[in-house]
Each structure stands twice: as C-alpha cells, then as structure tokens.
Amino acid sequence: MAPLTKTLEIRTSPHILSGYSVDTIMFNVVLALIPTTAFAVYAFGLAGLLTLVTATLSCVLTEHLICRFVRRSSTLADWSVTITGLLYGLTLPPGLPLWMVAVGGFIGVALGKWLFGGLGGNPFNPALVGRAVLQAAFPVAMTSWISGFTPGRFSSLPSSTLTPPFTEPVYDAVTGATPLALWKFDRVLTGTGDLALGMIGGSTGETGSLLILLGGLYLVARNMMNWRIPVAILGTVAAFSGILYTLDSQAYASPLFMLFSGGLMLGAVFMATDMVGSPMTSLGCVLYGALIGVLVVVIRVWGGMPEGVMYAILLGNAIVPHIDGMIQPTVYGTSGREKRE
C-alpha cells in the first residue's frame, strides 16, 4: 500500500472562508473613507487637515508604543488603528486645539481598545470612546465650531488650533452653530440641499453625507459591511421623526433634516457597523440598529444636547452582548426549541 502523501486536518467550523483577511477589509474601509476625508479638508482647509492628521498620528503612535510595551508584534499593518484615527478625527470640531486632539487619540486607543485586549476585544468603538472623554473633559472646546468654506481656510489657521497645552483656547470671530444646534435652540432649519451637499458647519465628518453613503455602498458591494445596521438606524430615525413631524411640524424637524444633519450618516455607516461591537445575527443587527435610531431621536428631541449619535452608539455597543445572548441561531439538526447548555 502506498504511503499517504497528505495530512488530514480536522478543524472546527466554519469551514467556508470568505477569502478576506483583516488587513484587506480594513484597507478597503480606509479607501471608502478617503472621499469623505478629502471633502472635509476641502471644507475646512488647514484646520481640518491638521485635525485629521493629528488624530490619526496620535492613534497610530499610541498603538505602536503599546505594542512595544506589551512585547507584541506591531499591528499597524492591519490598518485598524488608521481607521480609528480617521473616524475619530472626523467626529471632532476642526478648530479643536491639537493637544486636545492628541489626548483623545491616546485615550481612544489605550483605554477604548487595548484595555480590553486590542483588536477584536473592544466592546466599544475606540474612536467614540476618545471623543466621549473629550466631550466630558472639554465641553466648551468640543462645542465651539468654525465655519466651513471660508476664503482664507488654506492660508491661515484658527487661533484655537495651536493653543498651548492646558491653556484656554481663544476662538476667532468666524464661528457658527451646527444645523442641529440652530434647530434645537433657535428653531432655525437648514435646507436639505445644504445638508446633503455639506455646505454647513460642524465636525469634519458632518459635511459629506452623500460621500459617506457612497463609501458605505462600496463596502456593502464588496460584502465587507452588514447593510442591515445602517438601514435599521436610518429607517428608524426616518420613521420615528416622521411620526413626530406628522403630529406637530412646528415643534419637530422633518425626517430629511434628521437624516442628513449631524453625525448620523458617519455613525450609522462607519461606526455602528464595527464588526467587534455589533451583533452576530441578522435579527440582532436589526434590533441593534433600531435601538440606536430610537436613542438618536430621543436625545436630539428631548435631551439637553443637540446631538446624540455618539451616546446612542456607545449604549448600543453596551447592549450587544445581551442581544447576542437572547437571539441565537438554530443549531443544525434541531428544531430550535431545545435548550442549549
């Protein structure tokens, strides 16, 4: 009998692989974010560019230093921390002092990611963890907005950008409220066209709703994003705000305004869909998205702050383990009624 020339490998499921490695998926997410990032730089000039560069570099440097400290191989090549840096920068006001940007980047990666074991172990989106800490520590700076599309945005910087560490920033006269703040506190609505095309002020990632959607469609077409999550979030926001608008169009904003204002598009497409912090089942993803959508509208309408996307996603991340525990797929060969140990 001829000797065996192949080794029989016995492995656990799943036995069908998608063919996409972690670094391939992450690199494609970076590609999907490039149009939004480029438009943010175009809208806010040097202030937006330095904010995004500082956010990304602070996250990348923190990741590298932690890898060396814990004596692990560098994980920079998988592109995950680059995504964290870009998303974190897109959530920030473009006139935020750069030292605050760097502090938030360090906190997001060190506490939001590595405290839980690194990539694959973090229950919360690291970019939002960094922003949430900045929101609590520097509320005035995080709610001071510079206007976009100013004539000298590529030749000068806002005075607040280069504020020395631990000193109070001084803001230029050219500032403006976000569309959500104008609606919530002054009942002034911004046109849907300006919202969709990004002709507004706000964080660097609030200005490219259509480009964000195009990036999401690209990832869905590549089968690198679960489309159920953004559809559930946006659908719930549209339905809930539509009901309120029908009841009283003077007191509540229209569904289109709710969809295209603030950081909803960025959060729904690129942050809530984080594979680590989202549910594993299709039904779980729908419930998770619906929960986030309800929280966004509740905070925007009845909360003390004009925006609620960040808190809604972080709360959704916290509930994901419970959703996964309650909604489990049926084991092959069973009726689904059997109790699992």
Image (cartoon, rainbow, N blue to C red):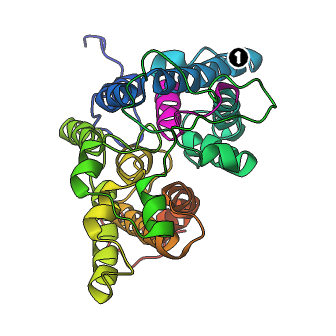
Q: Residues within 10 Å of mark 1 (few under 14, many from 20)?
A: few
Tell me residue 332's x, y (percent): 31, 61
The image quadrant of residue 66 is top right
Q: Is residue 76 magenta?
A: no
| Residue nearest the observer in this picture, 187 or 165 | 187
In the rendered structure, the answer to whether residue 88 lies left or right of residue 167 reads left
In the rendered structure, the answer to whether residue 120 lies left or right of residue 338 reads right
The image quadrant of residue 43 is top left
| Residue nearest the observer in this picture, 69 or 137 | 137
Tell me residue 181's x, y (percent): 49, 60
In which quadrant will I find the N terminus?
top left
Residue 9 visible in this rendered orientation of the protein: no
| Residue nearest the observer in this picture, 109 or 284 | 109
**Against 321, is 72 above or below?**
above
**Against 258, is 213 above or below?**
above
Secondary structure beneath dot 1 equals helix
Residue 163 visible in this rendered orientation of the protein: yes
Tell me residue 54's x, y (percent): 58, 22
Outermost residue, left direction? 221
Instruction: Kindly identify the residue that appears in the image at 60 percent across and 49 percent down.
Output: 143
Q: Which residue is mark 1?
A: 65
Instruction: Kindly identify the residue that appears in the image at 31 percent across and 16 percent down.
Output: 6
The image quadrant of residue 117 is top right
Q: Is residue 98 magenta?
A: yes
Instruction: Kindly identify the residue that appears in the image at 30 percent across and 65 percent down.
Output: 333
Q: Which segment did they paint magenta?
A: 81-99
In which quadrant will I find the C terminus?
bottom right
Question: What is the three-letter code of the residue carrying label 1?
Answer: Leu
Tell me residue 99's x, y (percent): 70, 26
